Every structure is written in C-alpha cells, then in structure tokens.
Image (cartoon, rainbow, N blue to C red):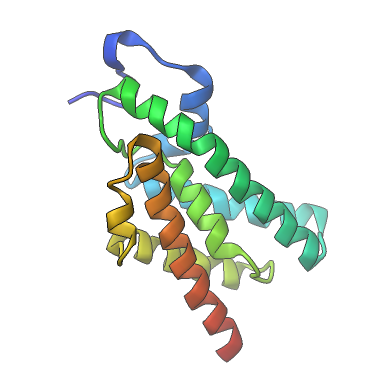
C-alpha cells in the first residue's frame, strides 16, 4: 500500500496536495480526518478571537470558506487520489474542513459551540447516515467531498436544535 507521500509514477501536484491535506493537517496521526476537523475549528476560532467579527461577518466568512473548500477541494481530492493510487485516501481532509465549517454555520464564536460542532460533525462523518454513504459513490473528488458535506449538514441541523434548547 502506498504511503501518503508515495504517488503513482512519482507525480505529485503541489497545489492539489496542499489543498487536499489542508496544508498538511491530513498527514497527522492517528485519525487524519479528526486533525482536519480540528484545524478547521481552530482556524474558525482564531478568526473570531483575533478579528472579533460580527456574527454576520463570521457567517459570511464561513460561507466563503465552505464555497472555496468545495470548489478547490473537489479537483484537489481528485488529483491527490489519482496520484496516490487510492480511491478515498485518509490524508485528503479538505472534505472534513468543508463539512466542519458547514457544521459551524450560525454558531456563536466560543469554545463550547466549537466543541459541540466538532463532536457532532465527527459523529456524522463516521456514521455516514443516509444519504452520506451513498454520496461516496459519486465519481472521484465529488464522492470524497460530498459525503462530508452531508455529514456537515446533519451536524448543522443538530447543533442548531441544541442552540435552541441550551
């Protein structure tokens, strides 16, 4: 089995691997998906802590991040998967970043809400309830990314309900 740094015919497209691993977060062990999710939450938290955006500005920044992570993530995941010779390599975590940022949409910028979104997203990402598992069957990067988009939407829904109740 190839390691994340071994590619088919030695090729590695630098921009795609940088995006796919979310600047190396996907190379963390154990559980690269968790490292990608944690990196996404930390980036969200740092943005909120250092720039003190309004809730509206935080929402817009997250929406922009989600759009960018999907738009760049699908082709990056496709290239990294092809070049590694794997269908859905664990080191590709841009999908976790997109899903995690979806789970954070509308969350107040504090550690408690960040932790709730993180735990919920990881649970739904691992469990892959319908239709998330079926989305994995989409071709190449589409399947890699969109099952996590679905997990992010599930986590967003539950987190939103929890915000109403707690």
- Who's the residue at 39% across and 61% down the image? 122
Query: Which is more toward the observer, 153 or 26?
Result: 153
Viewed as shown, does residue 4 lie left or right of 38?
left
Indicate the position of residue 18 as horizontal and vertical percent values: 51, 27
Q: Please say whether residue 21 is visible from this viewpoint.
A: no
Q: Position of residue 101 (x, y in %)?
A: 57, 56
| 128 up-or-down from 20: above or below | below
- Number of marks drawn: 0
Residue 45 picture quarter: bottom right
Question: Is 66 placed left or right of 75 in the picture?
Answer: right
Position of residue 20 relative to residue 164, above or below, is above
> Residue 85 is drawn in which quadrant?
top left
Residue at 46% over, 26% down: 17
Residue, far bottom: 165
Residue at the front extreme of this rendering: 138
Q: Residue at x 47, y 37 (%)?
A: 74
- The relative height of residue 149 versus residue 103 in the rendered view (above or below) is above
- Residue farthest to the left? 1
Residue nearer the viewer, 23 or 58: 58
Q: Position of residue 155 (x, y in %)?
A: 46, 69
Image quarter in which the N terminus is found: top left
Q: Say if 160 sits above or below 128 in the image.
A: below
**Image quarter of the C terminus:** bottom right
Image x and y of residue 68, in percent: 61, 41
Q: Is residue 32 or residue 13 the one in the foreground? A: 13
In the image: residue 137, left or right of residue 50: left
Residue 25 in view, yes or no: yes
Q: Residue at x 37, y 11 (%)?
A: 11
């Amino acid at each position: 089995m190839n390691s994340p740094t071994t590619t088919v015919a030695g090729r590695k497209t630098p921009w795609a691997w940088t995006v796919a691993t979310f600047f190396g977060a996907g190379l963390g062990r154990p559980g690269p998906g968790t490292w990608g999710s944690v990196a996404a939450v930390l980036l969200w938290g740092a943005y909120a802590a250092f720039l003190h955006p309004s809730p509206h500005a935080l929402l817009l920044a997250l929406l922009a991040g989600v759009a960018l992570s999907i738009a760049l993530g699908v082709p990056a995941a496709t290239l990294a998967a092809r070049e590694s010779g794997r269908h859905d390599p664990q080191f590709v975590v841009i999908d976790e970043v997109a899903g995690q940022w979806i789970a954070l949409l509308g969350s107040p910028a504090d550690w408690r809400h960040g932790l709730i979104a993180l735990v919920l997203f990881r649970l739904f990402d691992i469990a892959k309830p319908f239709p998330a598992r079926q989305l994995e069957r989409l071709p190449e990067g589409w399947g890699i990314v969109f099952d996590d988009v679905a997990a992010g939407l599930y986590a967003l829904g539950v987190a939103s309900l929890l915000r109403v109740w707690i």
